[in-house]
Image (cartoon, rainbow, N blue to C red):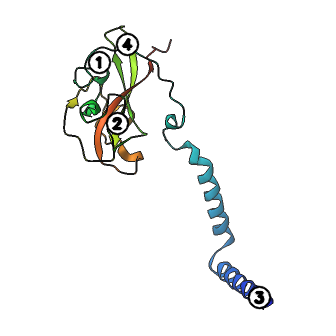
Amino acid sequence: MAQRNGGDVDGWLETASRRLARTTSRRGFLGRIGAALFGAAALPLLPVARAAAQPSRAPSAPESGDPASCDYWRYCAVDGFLSACCGGTHTSCPPGTQMSTVTWIGTCRNPVDGKDYLISYNDCCGSTYCGRCFCNRNEDDRPVYQPGKANDINWCMGTPTTAYSSTVALVLGVATDGK
């Protein structure tokens, strides 16, 4: 009986192999294999947020002002509802939401120490929008053809839901002039 079952598998494989050989050419088969290998090699080049997998090493910046106010120094390029007014803080999302992994970046001057800081604006996603403390400051905003510097995009694309709730402002580091 075991022999018969093995023969059934052999027969099925033979039939499937012959059908595949009749319906495909060698060039087409090799082309598909080449495309699959090229696609697999190009996969690490896709634009993904690799910072989410790394431990946070954000510097501390001297703080002053009210994180629930649009005039707070970190919000120079924000466009959305402030997480600090929606149950979260200026650095953490409200309960029931999760922080987006794709962000836009701004450079804001801290009035306490006079330094410019790189700020990452992460949307909080997962529930309906908050509706409180809307802030739209477009200092140094760029047109949408530079999406990494534009704040008019729903950045919840990398999360299980695209429902926008609010926005947080995380300090990434001190801005340098590149010299």
Q: Is residue 137 left or right of residue 121?
A: left
Instruction: Please tell me which residue is depicted at 25% across the width and 20% down the height of the picture.
Output: 66
Q: Which numbered disc, 1 or 4, marks the residue closer to the eye?
A: 4
Q: In whole angstroms, how far apart are the C-alphas of marks 3 and 2?
A: 60 Å
Query: How busy is the neighbourhood of tag 4: few (under 14 within 10 Å), some, or many (20 plus)?
Result: few
Q: Which mark is residue 93?
A: 2
Please state which amino acid type lies under the numbered disc 3: Gly
Of callouts 2 and 1, the N-terminal one: 1
Q: CB of mark 4 within 8 Å of CB of mark 2?
A: no
Percent from the top left, x then y, of residue 20?
Answer: 65, 78
Of callouts 4 and 2, the N-terminal one: 4
Instruction: Please tell me which residue is depicted at 34% across the width and 13% down the height of the picture.
Output: 110
Percent from the top left, x then y, of residue 88?
Answer: 31, 33
Q: Is residue 85 left or right of residue 10?
A: left
Which part of the image, by quadrant, shows the N terminus?
Answer: bottom right
Q: In whole angstroms, how far apart are the C-alphas of marks 1 and 3?
A: 75 Å
Q: In whole angstroms, how far apart are the C-alphas of marks 4 and 2?
A: 21 Å
Q: Which numbered disc, 2 or 1, marks the residue closer to the eye?
A: 2
Q: Quadrant of residue 80?
A: top left
Of callouts 3 and 2, the N-terminal one: 3
Q: CB of mark 1 within 8 Å of CB of mark 3?
A: no
The secondary element bearing badge 2 is classed as loop
Please state which amino acid type lies under the numbered disc 1: Trp
- The residue beneath circle 3 is 7
Q: CB of mark 1 within 8 Å of CB of mark 4?
A: no
Of callouts 1 and 3, the N-terminal one: 3
The secondary element bearing badge 4 is classed as loop
Of callouts 4 and 3, the N-terminal one: 3
The secondary element bearing badge 3 is classed as helix
- The residue beneath circle 1 is 73
